[in-house]
Amino acid sequence: MIEEVIIFGTVQGALLALLALGFSLVYGVGGVLNLAHGAFYLITAYIIFWTIPLFGFTVSAIVGLIAVMGIAAFTSLALIKPLQDTHIGVVLVTFALAFFFEQFVKYFGDPLYHYIAPWVPGFITLLGINLQAQLLALVIGSIALVIVVTLFINKTKIGKSIRAVSQDAEAASLVGINTDLVLMTSLVLSALLVGFAVIFYAPGNYIAPHIGWRYLLLAFSVTIFGGMGSIPGSIVGAFIMGYATTFTDYFPMLGPEYSQLIPIVVILVMLLIRPQGLLGKEEVQ
Amino acid sequence: MTLLLEVKNLTKKFGGLTAVNDVNFEIERGEILGLIGPNGAGKTTLFHLISGFEKANSGTVRFDGIDITGLKPYQIVNLGMARTFQLVRSFRFLNLLDNVAVAILSARGKAAFGEIGIDEAASTILSEVGLVDKARVPPVILPHGDLRRLEIGKALGTNPEMLLLDEPFSGLVHEEKEKITQLINRLRTEGVTIFVTGHVLRELMTLVPRVIAMHHGRLIAEGPPKEVANNRIVLEAYLGRGEEFA
Amino acid sequence: MMRLQLDLRSFFERFKIWAVSFRGSITLIALAGLSLFPPITRSVYWTQILISAMIFAIFAASWDLLAGYAGQVSFGHSVFFGAAGYVTAALVRYLGVNWILSLIAGAFAAVLFSLLIGIPCLRLKGPYLALGTLAFSLILLSLFYMGPPWSDILGGSEGISGLPVPPNIFVAFYLVLGFMIISLFGMHAIVESRLGTLLKAIRDDETCADASGINTTVYKLIAFMLSGFFAGIAGSLFVLQQTAVNPAYFQPLYSFYAIIMASIGGIATIFGSIAGSFIFWILSEFLRPLAAAALLIFATLLILIVRFAEEGVMNPVMERIQEYWDKFRGM
């Protein structure tokens, strides 16, 4: 059992890191809880699924990435920014957007489950466990992307602006940082990470119109666990959560039915005992 | 005179920064005490600690003989200590009458004004702070000076024995400052104890007989305003920051 | 006795003044039109739809009470709906309790759940609260869907069905109409009262309410309980109408319906929920040929309303009608 938990927990953690990193970043920058985050996953997966017969996987993946980044930019400029003063407005509008994409794929597709074939074919054996090679690609890709994003945040000018805004938005705008642009950049960046999560994880898995909510909950549970707005927190949180859910999957007497509940229980427990998360900073009035 | 507020060894740290560092002072019943210090000296944090909006790392605050350290803000208000905010706060979708009514609906407010009726009491307080003709408008359309007086009005709705006024003059023109000064003086004659901050001493010079000065979280001087104004350490604290002082 | 008479008289006086005022007249005309609908059309089909619309008007208004007035945005409102529904269904089906008692029990069960959610979620604000409440509803949804041993107690995915069918649909219509009128006027009275002032104060600035000596914790809990109570009434009524309950009652979709309806009608209006719910149900009916597109259209509508018409439709439309009304009366 321990081998399964190590292998599949790492896989799950790699997926969660991609989902949670951007989500946390956006919250840190604008105090925006993007309830359409899971819907970004959903729409990217369907765009790729729909366009594969036309272009093949590689081109479809690029189309999907560009589309979701465009959607994120539009969301930021047209929906979030004008409503940022009213916090209920942002929550409602991003929720409505998530609901919209769910209905959109249901209407233009169908409510059924669909399968996307893995683009890394075959299986490999690690620690005596058979693993889809696709999932290994996920782990490698996720680690690479996390490193790239960390470098981007720490080294580039816009990345430094993102950090400045998430530390103190008011001070950042006083020194001339365009906070709207920073919010848009981080939303687009989060969409890009979600897009890569789709590219690595959706092939070999099933997609359906309602899956967006599950990915939103996963991202939220990891971020709440690791600390809203904390980048290291969301990465550490992702892997801890990954191992925890996998452990429950394989634990006798429990099983997958219960591991579905884990993210939700984590959300509640963390919200109640340590709302700032494992590595989050305490909010100062 | 008897002691009303007693602050002992109060300390508050934010990460590596000690915002309030081992502060000790006392206020007697019916007194008016000023608190000065340059921006960032820790005045607002000290206010937050006394009024329960922040939790101190160590030290105690006693009000009217009761240890109020660690009590919730509303509990402290209901014991008779109300405060205003440096950045004015109000209920933006309620009219001024209801803004004050909220305070009157507090346990202490109800006990004091319940007999008169909430609307009546709220209008009386609004006329006391000079806003009764605007009772039916929401605060968002008011000029800054009116908002400052609304803040005091809301505090009065809780029938306070002591008022903490956080920078009541900041951002006001001369006439508005005059109005606030008159209001504070009137409250004093009614027996309200007042603790008031300002970051320029000139504002407090004629208002208070005694001030304490704060810098880097510590109390650095205490005495009549004239003395404190000439205190070398206080001057350096201000000059070091290049801020306007007297 | 004397006092009661006086109060009654002043009540009738106030009612008279209200009835001839614009809002009063419109309300009375709309209610009269609604209550004449079944005898005139004799359509069982449309009567059913209007019953659902009235039930969801109560549900949406209960969300509005909590979110629009007390500022506590809940995404888990379906918990109250489902909890009340299950209690009512179990009492009616297994214990043979009379429907009105079951309904009241259901509403109180919802109040219990409002405390269960409200107390732990009290320290959460804004989006955190929204997601915390959403998480609660998802836990209940999963629990109720689970197989044995859970399903032995909770009924599993089948839920509870086979409740007695209301003997006369038209009688049911007027009963639900009565429930809607009492609930909506009740909620309206609450938000207009001094309790309402405190809830709005907490919504506008919680720190400032605290500084005004208000124990915000207690009042937020009161808001949760009141909202849960009315949402529970709606849930119980809906179960009695559908004659069955299943885990789907806990699904987020029902919470979202309440949000959509309240937003269409206008947040922080209470009565707007009636407009929102009727628009939703009647439009759904007309969009039925388009099947899946109906919800897509509602999603689009919700985005547009939240983004461009924060006020919802009711108040702006009423103001327009009032202009004509004043002209008409001036003639």
Image (cartoon, grey):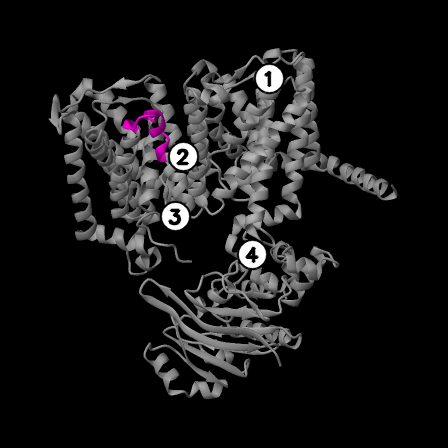
- Asked if residue A260 lies in the magenta stretch, the reply is yes
* Rendered residue at 26%/53% (across/down): A163
Say which chain tag 2 marks: A
Query: Distance of mark 3 from mark 2, alpha carbons?
Result: 25 Å
Q: Is residue B181 left or right of residue C304?
A: right
Vertical side of A282 occupied by B1: above or below? below
Closest to the camera, between mark 2 and mark 1, is 1
- The image shows residue C220 at horizontal and vertical percentages of 55, 45
Closest to the camera, between mark 4 and mark 1, is 1
- Which mark is first along the chain, 2 or 3? 2
Query: Distance of mark 3 from mark 4, alpha carbons?
Result: 36 Å
Residue beneath disc 4: B139
- The image shows residue A102 at horizontal and vertical percentages of 36, 26
Q: Which residues are magenta?
A: A249-263
Query: Distance of mark 4 from mark 1, alpha carbons?
Result: 56 Å
Vertical side of B91 occupied by B209: above or below? below
- The image shows residue A238 at horizontal and vertical percentages of 27, 39
Residue beneath disc 2: A95
Query: Distance of mark 2 from mark 4, alpha carbons?
Result: 31 Å
Residue beneath disc 1: C94
The quadrant the N terminus of chain B occupies is bottom right
Residue beneath disc 3: A274
Q: Residues within 10 Å of mark 4 (few under 14, many from 20)?
A: many
Circles 4 and 1 on the same subunit: no
